[in-house]
Image (spheres, rainbow, N blue to C red):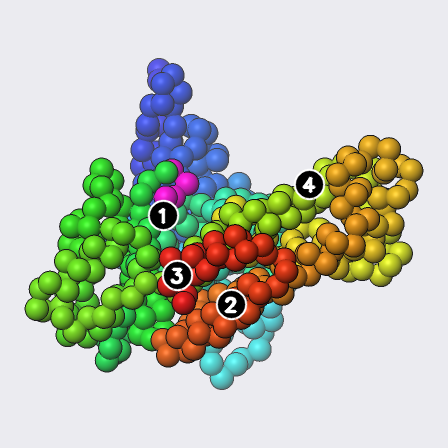
């Protein structure tokens, strides 16, 4: 005769996964192997969605300690009036039950003794044992989950951080009753909630602003997808939206149409300026936009920071600077990639009390060239001391040795820094959120005077000076 199924199967759904069979909880959708004891234990301790009335039935027949049953009866008796809740709805009593289950055996004995003491002494008001243990209600749990999720999103942390045992242990110490959200929850409804809240906040900021300015730029993401973003200045900058251009070409007509769509979403009356880079298709899109009377009040500007970056790229192509920065790259590469020269340089750096170190140059961060030149100038004494040591000079290329020991190289480096450091300072200023358009104009005029004066230095030949002036005119700094 076939043994009948255990009554715990009323609360689980049988699901076949290939040759194996799994039991899926009808309340919280957790899956287990078909093991009755584990399924009962899940309903009693792990499942936060299981109603108290169902937990009470299983506790009466389960193999648990008498202390545990007594504590459970106290809670269940006080919660029978609320036991008619629909299955699957999280109630306050379910969280109280989990609070009890989170206690260890020593805490149970303490709670039982407190219960017997409360019977012996007549209090003015009846007390409940659940008031002496840590509790968390659904509202508080949801609030903590959202705060934790925002911290993860703002810090750009991986979602699997919730599975880290040290993170779990930390939260267990500070709040044992609280359980971290799962990675799927961080990637699911918590992310949707945080995104929705931010969209509401941005919309409120935009609605309250009397005037708006649109800033747009394009790039390719890590999947090589073409993206155009739209920032709105209120004047506080806020991210409005991004556009995946997919198969569309970045023609002037296409870009102008997307600008029109964003302007109408924001309200054309409130939009007074549009800022983009200085590309030809962007300038053509400006002209298309200005050809319609509804957009005549909108002023179109090129990005000042982008202008300075373009000028620096032109400056990099000048022969005098190109040769100099090439030597610096070789020096940095030699002392960073060779372990013996790196160790000798580190020792000499410490002997001379130099806190800085050599930094590499990034292709996407042009200011890194200036930083590299600054760092190598600071480390001048350590480099000179290192290159003459036997452990280094035997393997060091003669070009690197000659340049480090040549004072002309260091003088030229200082002269280039004198030209470029004000340029880097100006870029930091124009990239700031509080820098006004009038201040940008004054900054450009001051930078123009500085560069023209630098052109008279003997570091440039007459032909190089002419090329530098052409770069200035092309980027419209003068």
Q: Which mark is residue 330?
A: 4
The answer to which of marks 4 and 3 sits earlier in the sequence is: 4
* Mark 2 in CB contact with mark 4 (< 8 angstroms): no
Residue behind mark 2:
452
- Crowd band around label 2 with a 10 angstrom C-alpha radius: few (<14), some (14–19), many (20+): some
Helix, strand or loop under label 3: helix
Question: Which region of the structure is painted magenta?
Answer: 219-223
Q: Which mark is residue 410?
A: none
The answer to which of marks 2 and 3 sits earlier in the sequence is: 2
Label 2 to label 4: alpha-carbon separation: 30 Å
The residue depicted at 15 percent of the width and 54 percent of the height is 257
Helix, strand or loop under label 4: helix
- Crowd band around label 4 with a 10 angstrom C-alpha radius: few (<14), some (14–19), many (20+): some
- Crowd band around label 1 with a 10 angstrom C-alpha radius: few (<14), some (14–19), many (20+): few
Q: Position of residue 355 (x, y in %)?
A: 77, 60
Label 2 to label 1: alpha-carbon separation: 33 Å
Q: Position of residue 290 (x, y in %)?
A: 15, 64
Q: Nearer the viewer, residue 244 or 45?
A: 244
């Amino acid at each position: 005769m076939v043994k009948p199924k255990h009554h715990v199967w009323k609360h689980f759904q049988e699901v076949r996964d290939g040759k194996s069979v799994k039991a899926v909880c009808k309340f919280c959708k957790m899956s287990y192997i078909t093991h009755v004891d584990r399924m009962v234990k899940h309903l009693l301790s792990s499942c936060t969605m299981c109603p108290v009335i169902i937990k009470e039935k299983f506790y009466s027949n389960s193999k648990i300690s008498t202390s545990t049953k007594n504590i459970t009866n106290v809670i269940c008796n006080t919660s029978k009036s609320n036991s008619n809740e629909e299955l699957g709805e999280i109630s306050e009593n379910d969280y109280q039950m989990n609070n009890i289950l989170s206690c260890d055996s020593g805490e149970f004995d303490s709670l039982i003794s407190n219960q017997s003491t409360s019977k012996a002494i007549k209090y003015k008001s009846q007390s409940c044992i659940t008031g002496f243990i840590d509790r968390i209600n659904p509202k508080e749990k949801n609030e903590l989950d959202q705060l934790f999720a925002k911290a993860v999103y703002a810090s750009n942390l991986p979602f699997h951080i919730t599975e880290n045992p040290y993170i779990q242990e930390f939260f267990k110490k500070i709040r044992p009753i609280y359980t971290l959200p799962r990675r799927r929850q961080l990637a699911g409804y918590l992310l949707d909630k945080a995104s929705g809240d931010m969209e509401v906040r941005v919309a409120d900021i935009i609605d309250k602003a009397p005037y708006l300015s649109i800033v747009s730029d394009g790039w390719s993401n890590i999947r090589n997808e073409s993206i155009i973003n739209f920032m709105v200045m209120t004047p506080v900058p806020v991210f409005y939206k991004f556009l995946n251009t997919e198969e569309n070409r970045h023609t002037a007509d296409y870009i102008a149409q997307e600008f029109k769509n964003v302007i109408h979403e924001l309200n054309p009356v409130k939009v007074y300026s549009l800022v983009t880079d200085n590309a030809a298709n962007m300038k053509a899109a400006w002209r298309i936009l200005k050809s319609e009377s509804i957009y005549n009040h909108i002023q179109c500007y090129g990005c000042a920071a982008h202008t300075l970056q373009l000028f620096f790229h032109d400056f990099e192509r000048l022969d005098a600077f190109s040769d100099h920065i090439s030597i610096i790259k070789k020096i940095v590469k030699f002392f960073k990639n060779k372990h013996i020269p790196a160790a000798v340089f580190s020792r000499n750096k410490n002997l001379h009390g130099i806190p800085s170190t050599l930094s590499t140059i990034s292709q996407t961060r042009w200011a890194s060239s200036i930083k590299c030149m600054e760092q190598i100038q600071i480390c001048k004494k350590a480099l000179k001391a290192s290159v003459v040591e036997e452990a280094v000079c035997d393997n060091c290329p003669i070009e690197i040795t000659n340049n480090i020991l040549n004072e002309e190289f260091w003088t030229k480096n200082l002269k280039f820094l004198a030209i470029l450091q004000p340029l880097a300072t100006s870029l930091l200023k124009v990239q700031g959120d509080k820098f006004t358009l009038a201040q940008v104009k004054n900054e450009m005029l001051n930078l123009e005077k500085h560069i023209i004066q630098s052109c008279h230095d003997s570091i440039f030949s007459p032909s190089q000076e002419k090329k530098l002036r052409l770069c200035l005119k092309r980027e419209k700094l003068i």
